[in-house]
Each structure stands twice: as structure tokens, then as C-alpha cells.
Image (tube, rainbow, N blue to C red):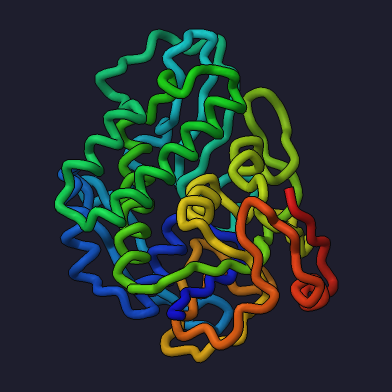
Amino acid sequence: MRIAYIECFSGISGDMTVGALLHAGVSEELLHQTVAALKIGAELRIRRLDRSGISATKVDVLVDGKIADRVDDSGHVHSHEHQHAHTHDHTHSHAHNHGHTHSHLHGHDHPKHGAVNHREARSLSTIKNIIRNAEIAAPAKEIAIRAFELLGQAEAGVHNVPIESIHFHEVGAVDTIVDIVCASVGCHALGVDRFICSPVNVGGGTVNCAHGEFPVPAPATLALLKGVPVYSSGIQSELVTPTGAALVRALNCSFSAFPFMSVESTGYGAGSREFDGRPSVVRISVGELCEAAGIFSHPESQVEPAALRQTSGTTLQVV
């Protein structure tokens, strides 16, 4: 059985996943074509850089030549309900010291916010139509649509609003759409039969939202990680983004420590910042599975004892 093993020892985000896929052998041209097929005015910037001595691939989404989230720092997800449950969808660095650039969702009340111009927002159904209309492989479309549905469900649940009311700000949504669709296309291009994921390092500390401080993981992220084995290595920074968590779920990953496999290729996807003693990367290894022992599937989520032993020094739990 051909597999891809995703290691989230420094968390996971959409851009890190795309970078790791490219580094593992997915065609750059394929992903450039994918972005063009979306017809949302975006492009990819792909480069190699160093993360704690490891060569990794960094991917940025550009709009009008600027990193998408920085075109308008107010990019967010919001509900149509004018209680105004709000979600920031942004990829710039935060005051709480993110380990990487990513598409992120923080829910917060915004009672003083004025009327929303919905011409500048994309609903979940609109985004799903963008994906359906793009000339990309059907299985990749299914993965991407599932990831967005999971994001919408998580946000709707956190804010107690109907999923139909969740809208993505035009600029903030571009980065998220590109990350999710490119990751989906890249995962399909690997031609694997199964995705297996390590337990996920969520980080630690708190995040500052308009409604106050929340412990890491943030509410939407934690909702998306339901049934996924998670732990904290003690790093006081938020390591998992909603986009990254949604991709893990949408890929129907099984979970284990490093499986008994014959590795054919390995890729490292870079985050935007570094930590002392730990590279800010996601690693994807592609090859043939030699033995299926010690692997379990979501949603049963029962960690095999060997997997627990191999995460010594950390706190591992299934949420």
C-alpha cells in the first residue's frame, strides 16, 4: 500500500502542507495551473529557505504582488447574523508569536462593527462553486470542499450560528482557498492509497481575541481537532491553524507514530518563523507501507501504546 506520512511535530498549516508536498515531488507547474484555474486573481511564490539547518519549501499566496493576507489585514470570516460573530482569517504574524505564517481563524464578538459589505465577502456556497468550476481533478475537488465544509461547521458551532451565515472576507479567503485547493491537488497528485498522520503538536500559551484571552488551541481549531490525537511539547506558541486541522480531517487520516514503511521521497514545508531547537516545518514522507500495525482511523481515535511511548516527554491526548 502506497502511503503519505504527515509529521506535525511543529504543528500544521495550509501553507506548510503545500510546501511539504512540493518538496516531496509535486509539480510546481501543476500548482501554478491550479491557482490559475481558480480564477480569483492569486498566484504562488515558491522558494527554498533554511529552517534550523533544514532546507524547506516556503509557499506564499500573492494578490497584486503582495502576500494575500497583507493586502488587507482586516481579512476575516463573519456571519450574516448581526450579532456579529466574527472570525479573523489572516496569515500575518501575531503578537502571541506564531511559529509560522498561516491562514488562521479566531472567533470574536464585534458589537461596534458597522454593516458588512457582502459584495466583499464569499459565502461557503460561493467558495464551493469556485472549486467545483475549476479545472482540477475531481478527487481533489472533493477533498477541498470537505475541508471548507469542516471549517464552516467549526465556525458555526463556535458562534452558534447557521453554517449558511458563515462568510469569508474576499481578501482573507483568497489565501485560504489557494492553500486548501493546492494542498488537495498536491495530495491527490501523490497517488497514495492512504494518509497517515503523527499525533499533532498544538503548542501552548494563549491567543488574544477581542473577547479576551483563550488558551491554545483556539476554539475553532479545537473543534476541528475532535477525534485527532494531540499533545503539547511545551512551546508557548500556537502551532496548528484551522486550515491545517481541516486538511488533516478532510484527508481522512489515520494516526500513528512513524509507520513501518519504505520511504521513496520526503518533503519539508516551512513556516514563517523559527523556534530555538525546533524547526518550524511539516514533514511528509511518501512510500510503501510494510506493516499496518499500530495505526488507527478517525473517529475511533485510540492511540496504540507504541505511539504513546514514542512521544515521551510530551503530553498526548485525544480530543
Image x and y of residue 113, in percent: 48, 12
Kindly indicate the quadrant of the structure image that contains residue 168: top left
**Residue drawn 54% across the image and 61% down it:** 253
78, above or below 253, in the image: above
Image x and y of residue 236, in percent: 74, 55
Residue 303 falls left or right of residue 260? right
**Residue drawn 76% across the image and 70% down it:** 304
Image x and y of residue 66, in percent: 28, 49
Q: Is residue 10 visible?
A: no
Residue 254 falls left or right of residue 250? right
Please state which of residues 272 and 135 is positioned toward the viewer in this rendering.
135
259, above or below 82, in the image: below
**Residue drawn 55% across the image and 88% down it:** 290
Kindly indicate the quadrant of the structure image that contains residue 233: bottom right
**Residue drawn 27% across the image and 30% down it:** 126
51, above or below 195, in the image: below
Please state which of residues 10 and 21 is positioned toward the viewer in this rendering.
21
Residue 168 falls left or right of residue 158? left
Q: Is residue 14 visible?
A: yes
